[in-house]
Image: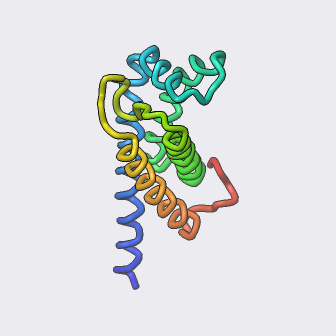
């Protein structure tokens, strides 16, 4: 039974490092160039104008914080839950714009609006992230090591 526990812990650690690394990496270009990221957010046509700049500034730091929390294990249940919500919102925004016929640039790893990749690939990638983050959430909730009644320790 000890081998199973080690495998379970290994899968949790690998997923934490992978998703945390993705979030941290994705935040860097947005922190460096918030104006370019604001243009990406504006292209989605989902937020009223007064909310675009605050989101362009706050969202990258939230991604970085969640990435650091996942990598370090700090506030893990809350970080995993917020990561799931973030990936769901991103995927929902991409899917909604696809249904509206808008081919928007994802903005996940680059704010380069000339990046020409079909939105369906962004959506498929993000849905994959949703499933991985969902799996991690289930593992963290079921793990007795984490008291899920506490969101932050």
Q: Residue at x 48, y 28 (%)?
A: 60
Looking at this rendering, what residue extends furthest in the front direction?
A: 101
Q: Which residue is drawn at 58% across and 47% down?
A: 85
Whether 6 is drawn above or below 132: the answer is: below
Left or right: 49, with 36 as reference point: right
Colour scheme:
rainbow
Q: Position of residue 49 (x, y in %)?
A: 63, 17
Q: Which residue is more in the foreground, 144 or 39?
A: 39
Q: Quadrant of the N terminus?
A: bottom left
Q: Residue at x 35, y 35 (%)?
A: 25
Residue 122 in view here = yes
- Location of residue 37 (image quadrant): top left
Q: Which residue is more in the foreground, 81 or 8?
A: 81
- Location of residue 20 (image quadrant): top left
Q: Position of residue 58 (x, y in %)?
A: 56, 25
Looking at this rendering, what residue extends furthest in the bottom direction?
A: 1
Q: Where is residue 14 in the image (x, y as percent from the top left)?
A: 35, 58
Whether 77 is drawn above or below 1: the answer is: above
Q: Which residue is drawn at 54% across and 51% down?
A: 84
Whether 55 is drawn above or below 153: the answer is: above
Residue 75 in view here = no
Q: Position of residue 63 (x, y in %)?
A: 48, 35
Q: Which residue is more in the foreground, 102 or 59?
A: 102
Whether 132 is drawn above or below 73: the answer is: below
């Amino acid at each position: 039974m000890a081998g199973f526990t080690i495998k379970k812990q290994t899968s949790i650690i690998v997923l934490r490092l992978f998703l945390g690394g993705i979030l941290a990496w994705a935040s860097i270009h947005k922190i460096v160039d918030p104006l370019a990221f604001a243009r990406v957010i504006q292209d989605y046509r989902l937020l009223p104008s007064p909310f675009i700049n605050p989101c362009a500034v706050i969202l990258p730091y939230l991604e970085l914080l969640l990435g650091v929390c996942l990598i370090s294990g700090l506030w893990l249940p809350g970080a995993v839950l917020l990561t799931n919500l973030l990936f769901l919102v991103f995927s929902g925004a991409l899917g909604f714009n696809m249904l509206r016929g808008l081919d928007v640039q994802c903005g996940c790893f680059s704010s380069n609006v000339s990046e020409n990749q079909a939105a369906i690939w962004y959506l498929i990638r993000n849905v994959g992230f949703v499933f991985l983050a969902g799996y991690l959430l289930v593992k963290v909730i079921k793990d007795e090591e984490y008291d899920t009644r506490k969101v932050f320790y």
